[in-house]
Amino acid sequence: MSTENTTAAGEPVLRAHDLAKHFSMGGFGRSRKVLRAVDGVSLEIGRGQTLGLVGESGSGKTTVGRTLIRLYRPTSGTVEFEGRDITTSSGNRLRRDVRRRMAMVFQNPSTSLNPYLRLGEALAEPLVVHGIGNAAERRTRVGEMMELVGLDASMAQRYPQELSGGQRQRIGIARALITDPSLIIADEPTASLDVSVQAQIVNLLGDLQRELGLAYLFITHDLALVRHISHRVAVMYLGRLMEVSPAESLFTEPLHPYSTVLASMHQEREHRIVPRGDIPSPMTPPSGCVFRTRCPIAREHCATQTPPLREVAPGRSVACHHPGELKLDRSASGVRPEPVGVTFTDEPATRQARPVSVGSVPHTSEEK
Amino acid sequence: MNPETDDILRLNQVSVGLRTAGGEARILRDVSFSVERGRIVALAGESGSGKSTALLAVLRLLAPGARVSGEILVDGQNIVPLRGRRLRDFRARTARMVFQDPWRALHPMHSIGGQLVESARAADRSLSRKAALDLAGDTLSRVGIPDPHARLRSYPHEVSGGQLQRIVIAMALVASPSLLLCDEPTTALDVTTQAQILELLQELNRDLGISIVVATHDLDVITDIADELVVMYAGAVSEEGPTEQVMARPEHPYTWSLLQAAPGRHPGERLRAIEGRPPSPLTVITGCPFAPRCEHRRQVCETAPLTPVSVAHAPERRSSCVRVTAASAGSMERTSG
């Protein structure tokens, strides 16, 4: 099962091989129930790169994130981080090798901050845990971090409830960055934010990546967002990886039928491929290929043989017996059409006060 | 009131205020829009824009203490003064709501059939239990639930999210309402399921002629099914018009900024964030509520009226941006007078 690809820049910061995480759901003996939340997941994240992890609810994407950062101990498989095997690390080694260098940004900034801690205290906590610096140095570091994420350092004295959702998420990011990690696991970091604020946070994450050389595992269900921010994208369905590809290829020429379905959701309605039925329960996944019950091109052998994830082109891996067979309608671009800028009747000559649109729009093209 | 068009729903200068510890919160500010019979209208906006409040106001489900002014006409009848039995009948028969989260919209301890029967008989008391159960089964089948008669005996926890949302829609449909209000009906669902539910809503609109109002934060999701788009910001209407026109050529800088801020239009570029955030409902707004965040603001914006007026160069459109409507100010007339 070769999934490792050659396009990730340099040595990957993280490499997971054949990772599985099963949860016991009660019962004894024969009636023992096991939820195979994650099975056979192999992926790598290049230094300074973003790997997008997409999937619908119950696909296991959050479990993958939590297993990689070792909030869970994998049932089987290995995780290598910065060249070290961290699969079974514990105690001081776990803190030193993993928790300082890998950090998490959570979905809901309102519940991931302690309401009784001032922001400065919340930010300094990881430094205290890791015994970094003295009180004065920590204060300086907290101030630097707040400014790095676009907040005024004087806000350190405030409490989380005094902040807006976007500001709280900036604190969540600052807290993740304060121990100088190389990899951030961001689990739906903008899902609870409005579009206009989401854009601010996404831009901030991009700036930080360029400045600090951070790698991200960006977990999301938002396809447009994942396409926008990822270098490569891994698609999960019912605990398994369906496809791992560079972001653009995944959305323009998907190989797995499930990727095709997802990519088609952004096209005009008549080009969309809406799968029948619902996602099966992860407790009772279908035999063979887990996607077969909803797959438009499923055959008989899809029910009996589980397709392994294998590299079919440089940097592209897919787990399907018939990769590339279900295609997107080529006539649709998948990029949303650009609206024409607002026309202001009080200044017909200049139209837009500032050049804000791209050159393809004649309406605002005078800036080009 | 409005003889020339057949409106199933019409809001006339509706304001909703709520007294809070911090002062008077203005949740809706002079909102006017109308829904023509048989159409799908989307109310779009970010959180705090007032889109959900507008739907709740139509069903008279606002929190106790909320003060409503203005007129809300459903099928020509002003529902603001309704009370007691007449209010109950209105809610049971005329307008029905589909909430965002199907898990919370159904009672976990009652069977699906039981809840559908209750819903149907609330609307039509002459319906026998047997007839209501038949109607429930037929309706489940209409919304695409496989093996509907078996499903009637199931409980909500036994059903997936997409199926549950279909059941919630069926629960509204058994009452044969003339107006279906949907508050973010697909937000809690996965993308593939989301597409299925939107198609179902459009089918119901086409086949049964039911008028639908959908509140949503995602403009791109709703474009396919909505005939008309009402964009809201800070409790007021920014602009409205036929969906395709609004999406292709916004007549308000807020709409334009909102479309630009979403990922997907400019691959590989920075997203175009809107700096700042919406005003708190506690602030007294003078002039255009979007002006502090608008890169096109001018002095006139500080005294601009809240209510959208028709746009001279696009007669089907209304915008509250004075810089868009200014030139036509002399000849324009308010469409919501």
Image: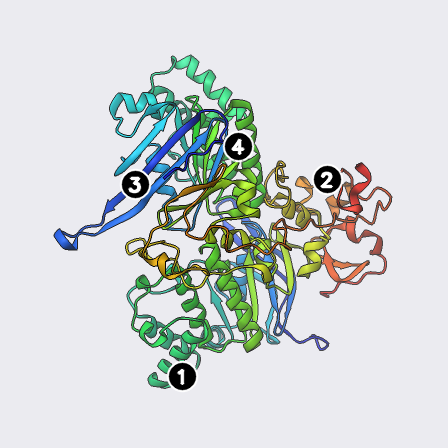
Q: Earlier in the sequence, mark 2 or mark 3?
A: 3
Q: Residue placed at 40% from the left, 34% from the top?
A: A113
Question: For numbered disc 1, what is the local secondary structure?
Answer: loop
Report the Cα–Cα distance between label 1 and label 3: 56 Å
Disc 2 residue type?
A: Val
Report the Cα–Cα distance between label 1 and label 4: 58 Å
Report the Cα–Cα distance between label 2 and label 4: 22 Å
Question: For numbered disc 4, what is the local secondary structure?
Answer: helix
Residue A344 in view, yes or no: yes
Q: Residue placed at 27% from the left, 26% from the top?
A: A89
Report the Cα–Cα distance between label 2 and label 1: 59 Å
Q: Are marks 2 and 4 in contact (CB under 8 Å)?
A: no
Question: For numbered disc 2, what is the local secondary structure?
Answer: loop
Q: Position of residue B229 (x, y in %)?
A: 64, 60
Q: Position of residue B287 (x, y in %)?
A: 71, 47
Disc 4 residue type?
A: Leu
Find disc 3 in the rendering and name its residue. A20
Chain letter for mark 2: A
The 10 Å Cα crowd at callout 4, few under 14, some 14 to 19, many 20 or more, is: some
Disc 3 residue type?
A: Ala
Residue B125's disc is 1
Note whether B183 is above or below B26 in the view shown.
below
Q: Residue placed at 26% from the left, 37% from the top?
A: A76
